[in-house]
Image (tube, rainbow, N blue to C red):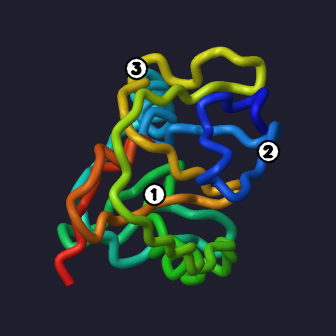
Amino acid sequence: MRALAPLIDRDRILGGFHTPDDGLAKALRAAEAQALRARARGATFRPHTEVLGILDDGRRVTGVRTAEGVLDADVVVCAAGFWGAHLARQVGLTLPLVPMAHQYARTGQISARRTQHRTRRGRPADPASPGPGPVLPGARRPSRYRLLQPSADAGRHGHPVRRHRG
């Protein structure tokens, strides 16, 4: 562990784990890149349009029924997130989305330190956001967290920090 993270205080840190095969994909950036390519190929996006159902002719999807009316389409991309499974069932498809419980951890005050996200080969993972803040890795699981009280600049995985008010 010392070779991988020499600044760790071994008197205060009881353990750790190293997962060299883990990686990080920025979902927002991936979606933006896919949307850019789709637009270049003629796709039309209808953000903030409530989809009420998917239309099909018994063989293929033909469009969607929205709160504003029917939209015919040769291709329909379901970008409804967790609600996509409900829409997919309407045309006999199974979209394997399952709600998951996440870890809960509570710490004392965390001091801000400069952190670096690195890839397997040691290169910076995201040069655009190498800023300060603790890293709370999720080890092959999504890791989102809320701050229960003011502390260091956390949430450096591209998710905005939301303080819990409950």
The residue wearing badge 1 is 79
Q: Residue at x 75, y 33 (%)?
A: 2
Determine whether label 2 and label 1 are within 8 Å by CB: no
Q: Position of residue 45 (x, y in %)?
A: 32, 44
Quarter of the figure that contains the C terminus? bottom left
Residue 157 place in picture, x, y as percent:
45, 43
Residue 146 seen by the camera: yes
Asked if the residues shown at circle 3 and circle 2 are in contact, with their CB atoms under 8 angstroms apart, the answer is no
Real-space Cα separation, disc 3 to disc 2, in angstroms: 23 Å
Q: Amino acid at mark 2?
A: Thr
The first of marks 3 and 2 along the sequence is 2
Q: Are marks 1 and 3 in contact (CB under 8 Å)?
A: no
Q: Quadrant of residue 111?
A: top left
Residue 42 in view in this figure = no
Residue tagged 2:
19
| Disc marking residue 128 | 3
**Horizontal placement of 101 versus 109: left or right?**
right
Identity of the amino acid at label 1?
Answer: Ala
Viewer-proximal residue, 107 or 118? 107
Camera-side residue: 75 or 40? 40
Amino acid on which the number 3 mark rests in the picture: Ala
Dot 3 surroundings within 10 Å: few (below 14), some, or many (20 or more)?
Answer: few
Mark 2 / mark 1, whichever is N-terminal: 2
